[in-house]
Amino acid sequence: AQAQAIYRKAAAEMGLAAAELPMTEAEFRATLDPVAIVKNRATSGGPQPAEMDRMLGDARRRLEQQDDWIKERRAKIASALARLDTDFATLAKGAN
């Protein structure tokens, strides 16, 4: 009843013909429920639980890939440093 009255008043203030809110009071109140808003906002990157789970899964996979990349690079650096030490030791022995 209150939502209908507000709708009629707004329509009158805008110079529109008398109109009824195209939903019931219960439907109107449901549209204002923040939990329902989040659940029903089905967009990519949206706040709905399924989309959040998808985005968190993607982020975890990217983090795992980055961790693997870092481990690989660190292993290559360690190998290069070991080779450098070996080559330097060989060079130092040859200079004596």
Image (cartoon, rainbow, N blue to C red):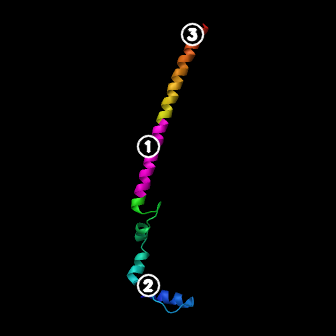
Residue corresponding to mark 3? 93
Residue corresponding to mark 1? 64
> Magenta segment: does it hold 32?
no
- Residue 36 drawn at (x, y percent): 40, 70
Do the numbered discs 2 and 1 sit on residues whose CB atoms are within 8 Å? Answer: no
Q: Secondary structure at mark 1?
A: helix
Residue corresponding to mark 2? 22
The kind of residue tagged 3 is Lys
The kind of residue tagged 1 is Glu
- Of mark 3 and mark 2, the one earlier in the sequence is 2
- Residue 46 drawn at (x, y percent): 46, 62
Q: Nearer the viewer, mark 2 or mark 1?
A: 2
The kind of residue tagged 2 is Pro
- Of mark 1 and mark 3, the one earlier in the sequence is 1
Q: Nearer the viewer, mark 3 or mark 2?
A: 2
Do the numbered discs 3 and 2 sit on residues whose CB atoms are within 8 Å? Answer: no
The residue at 45%/89% (across/down) is: 20
Q: Secondary structure at mark 3?
A: helix
- Of mark 2 and mark 1, the one earlier in the sequence is 2
- Residue 39 drawn at (x, y percent): 40, 67
Highlighted magenta segment, given as a residue range: 52-70
Q: Which mark is residue 17?
A: none
- Residue 83 drawn at (x, y percent): 52, 21
